Image (spheres, helix red, strand yellow):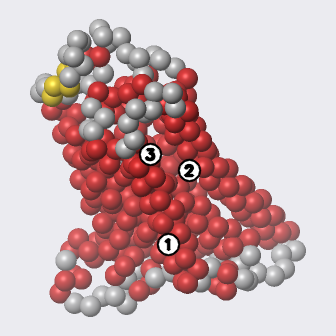
């Protein structure tokens, strides 16, 4: 869909620091420069940190029985999606960047887009599920355990991955057809406008609505506690901290992904070639979100810091520590 953008032949050389484009044949030629080497070195480091950080989250939640809770199961599945971003999306995006795929709309470019869409949609759907989990934990604490059981969480995770996979596959299949001279603009508008509405904007509205309800209930409970008129179940300190942490995860997600989706949505309505490197930069900012989540957990959760120390020391290889009490 990006290949329909009209580009000035004098501008194509600056679109990608690691590629050159012949101004007459528009053939893409890889090139090596100091900027390119530093760029790929930085992105490789970003990918490595993403994989290691999310692998620590996965091992921690999977290994220690104390962490086998519905909320942490959702965090575990989200970490798997972030891990796959580091393993699959980062290498594909380095080899087949947005600007290079404008001139080389190969199967690998379509596969890269498919993984990108699948895992970003999977992340936002998991955040939707987490917001629902937090809503019941804070707003309806008496019915939380009955409403959000392990079976319900498994259903949430399965639906999130299933829908995301369908959207990713549909994206690839829709782009395999060639010769859409009359319908290309319609396809681009559908992909760049309708797609983001259902995969990003609508879920974000739902999530923000849930957290707004949580905030209002938490404020009401805080005032009730201060005046001594609190009756019924109160939200534990642990639940409040978990809600703040996961709200921070949501905030970081919005900071990383919103600029990309706003720019991506407006792409079909502009022919300015300068937008391409901007969108590519915003795409890397969005992908970096997968690296940041483990650092948020490490900052807010003492149990995660304790788990990391045990894992990094290699103690889990020498003895059974699954029942260890994490502080």
Comparing marks 3 and 1, which lies closer to the viewer? 3
User: Residue 259, image x and y in percent?
Assistant: 51, 35
In primary-sequence order, the first of circles 1 and 2 is 1
Residue 292 pos. (x, y %): 40, 52
Residue 82 falls in image quadrant: bottom left
Disc 1 crowd rating (10 Å Cα; few below 14, some 14-19, many 20+) is few
Residue for point 51% across, 78% down: 154
Q: Position of residue 130 (x, y in %)?
A: 57, 66
| Residue that numbered label 2 is attached to | 199
Q: Nearer the viewer, mark 2 or mark 3?
A: 3
Q: Give yes or no for contact between labels 2 and 3 (Cβ–Cβ under 8 Å).
A: no
Question: What residue appears at the point 27 percent right and 44 percent down from the top-left corner?
Answer: 108
Q: Name the residue located 76 percent from the left edge and 81 percent from the top edge.
A: 233
Which quarter of the image is occupied by the C terminus?
Answer: bottom left
Crowdedness near tag 2: few (<14), some (14–19) or many (≥20) residues, C-alpha within 10 Å: some
> Residue 23: in sight, yes or no?
yes
Q: Which mark is residue 158?
A: 1
Residue 171 percent across, percent down from the top left: 44, 48
- Relative depth, front residue between 137 and 210: 210
Residue 219 visible? The answer is: no
**Cα–Cα span, label 2 and label 3:** 17 Å
CA gap, disc 3 and disc 1: 24 Å
Residue behind mark 3: 174
Vertical side of 53 occupied by 178: above or below: above
- From this view, report whether residue 284 is shown above or below residue 306: above
Q: Nearer the viewer, residue 282 or 194?
A: 194
């Amino acid at each position: 869909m990006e290949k329909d953008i009209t580009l000035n032949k004098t501008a194509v050389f600056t679109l990608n620091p690691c590629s050159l484009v012949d101004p007459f044949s528009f053939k893409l030629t890889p090139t090596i420069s100091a900027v390119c080497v530093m760029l790929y070195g930085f992105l490789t480091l970003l990918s490595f940190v993403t994989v290691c950080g999310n692998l620590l989250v996965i091992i921690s939640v999977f290994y220690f029985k104390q962490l086998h809770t519905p909320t942490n199961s959702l965090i575990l599945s989200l970490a798997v999606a972030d891990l796959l971003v580091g393993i699959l999306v980062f290498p594909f995006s380095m080899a087949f960047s947005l600007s290079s795929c404008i001139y080389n709309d190969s199967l690998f470019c379509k596969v890269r887009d498919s993984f990108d869409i699948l895992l970003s949609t999977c992340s936002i759907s998991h955040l939707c599920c987490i917001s629902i989990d937090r809503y019941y934990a804070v707003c309806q604490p008496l019915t939380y355990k009955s409403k959000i059981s392990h079976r319900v969480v498994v259903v949430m995770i399965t639906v999130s991955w299933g829908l995301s996979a369908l959207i990713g596959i549909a994206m690839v299949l829709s782009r395999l057809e060639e010769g859409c001279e009359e319908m290309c603009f319609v396809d681009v508008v559908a992909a760049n406008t309708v797609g983001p509405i259902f995969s990003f904007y609508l879920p974000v509205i739902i999530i923000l609505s849930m957290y707004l309800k949580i905030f209002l209930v938490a404020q009401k409970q805080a005032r009730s506690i201060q005046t001594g008129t609190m009756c019924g179940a109160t939200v534990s300190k642990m639940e409040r901290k978990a809600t703040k942490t996961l709200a921070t995860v949501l905030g970081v997600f919005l900071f990383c992904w919103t600029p990309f989706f706003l720019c991506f949505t407006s792409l079909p309505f502009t022919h300015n070639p300068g937008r391409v490197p901007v969108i590519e930069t915003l795409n890397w900012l969005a992908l970096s979100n997968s690296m940041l989540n483990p650092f948020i957990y490490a900052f807010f959760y003492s149990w995660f810091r304790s788990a990391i120390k045990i894992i990094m020391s290699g103690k889990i290889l020498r003895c059974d520590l699954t029942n260890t009490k994490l502080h």
